[in-house]
Amino acid sequence: MKAEERHHLKQNEFAISVARLAAGAQANRARVVQIVAAVVVIAGIGFAITLWQNKKRDAAGGDFAKAMSIAQSQIAPAPTVPGASQAAGTFPTVQARQEAALKAFQQVASTYPSTAEGMSASYQAAGVLASLDRLAEAEKAYQDVISRAGTSIYAAMARMGLAETLVGEKQFDRAIKEYTDLSAQRDGVVPVDSVLLQLARAYQKAGKATEARATFKRVVDEFPDSNHVTEARQQVTLLGGA
C-alpha cells in the first residue's frame, strides 16, 4: 500500500473516531441535561410541598389559637340598654362561650385533621362536649382521638377524658378498666398518682368502697410526695382505713 493511501486511511479512521466521540458526548450531554432537568423539577416540587405544608401549619396554628381564645373569653352580662350589643370578645353565659368554642374547635379539627393542631382541636372539642353534658357525643369524640392519635400524648389524655365521661354516664366498669390500664403505664405521659386518684373516685361512685380505699392507700404509700396525698389520706380515713 502506498504511503499516501495509508495516510488517507489513518485520516479517515481518526475522523470516524472523532465523530463517534462527538456523537457520544452529544448523547451524554443530552442525558445530563435531562437528569439535571428532572432534579430541578423534583426539587421544585419538594420546595412547593414544603412551602404549602408550612403555610398550612401556620394557618392551623392561627385558627387553633383563635379557638382557644374563644374558650378563654370573659363572661359579661348581656347589655340591658336598648340597641346595645355584647362587648367584643365576651359572652353572656358560660354555655354560650362553650357553644362558640365547640364550633371553633370542630372547624379546626375538620379543616386540618392531619396536623397536631387538628388533633388538639379534636381533643378540646371532646372536652367541651363533656362540659356541656353531651356525654354520648363526648365519648364518641374521645374514641375518635384515641383511634387516630397513636402513641402521642393525645391518646393518653383522650383515654383519661373518656374514662371521666364514662363515669358521668355511670358506665363504671368501663371507666375503671380505662383507669386501671392507664395506671399500669409507669412511663406514660399521665402521672400515675393522678390516674390512681381518679380510679379511686370511680370506685367510690360505683359503690366499691373496699377497692376505693385500697386505691387511695396506693397513692399514699407509692407516691408520698404527690400533691394528691392529703386528699388520699383523708379518704383512706373516711373509708375506714388505718
Image (cartoon, rainbow, N blue to C red):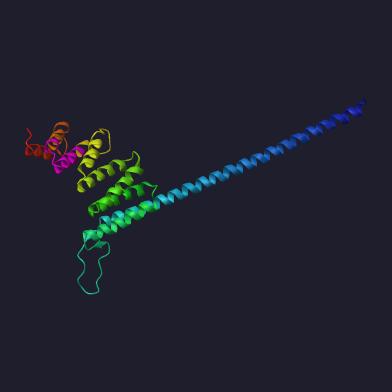
Question: How far from the left and from the top, in percent, is residue 159?
Answer: 27, 42
Q: Nearer the viewer, residue 29 or 167?
A: 167
Q: Is 178 left or right of 7, judged from the image as shown?
A: left
Considering every residue shown, the one lying at the far top of the view is 1
Question: How many dots with numbers?
Answer: 0
Considering every residue shown, the one lying at the far right of the view is 2
Q: Residue at x 26, y 53 (%)?
A: 129
Quadrant of the image for the C terminus?
A: top left
Q: Nearer the viewer, residue 29 or 124?
A: 124
Q: Is residue 153 magenta?
A: no
Question: How far from the left and from the top, in percent, is residue 11?
Answer: 84, 31
Question: How far from the left and from the top, in percent, is residue 54?
Answer: 43, 49
Tell me which segment is drawn in magenta: 195-211
Q: Say which quarter of the image contains residue 17.
A: top right
Q: Is 104 left or right of 42, judged from the image as shown?
A: left
Question: How far from the left and from the top, in percent, is residue 99?
Answer: 27, 58
Q: Say which quarter of the image contains residue 84.
A: bottom left
Q: Residue at x 51, y 45 (%)?
A: 46
Quadrant of the image for the N terminus?
A: top right
Q: Nearer the viewer, residue 216 or 63?
A: 216
Q: Is 34 left or right of 183, judged from the image as shown?
A: right
Q: Residue at x 29, y 52 (%)?
A: 125
Q: Residue at x 25, y 59 (%)?
A: 97
* Vertical arrangement, residue 165 with respect to residue 90, above or below: above
Q: Say which quarter of the image contains residue 39.
A: top right
* Vertical arrangement, residue 125 with respect to residue 93, above or below: above
Q: Is residue 204 magenta?
A: yes
* Vertical arrangement, residue 158 with respect to residue 129, above or below: above
Magenta residues: mostly which secondary structure? helix
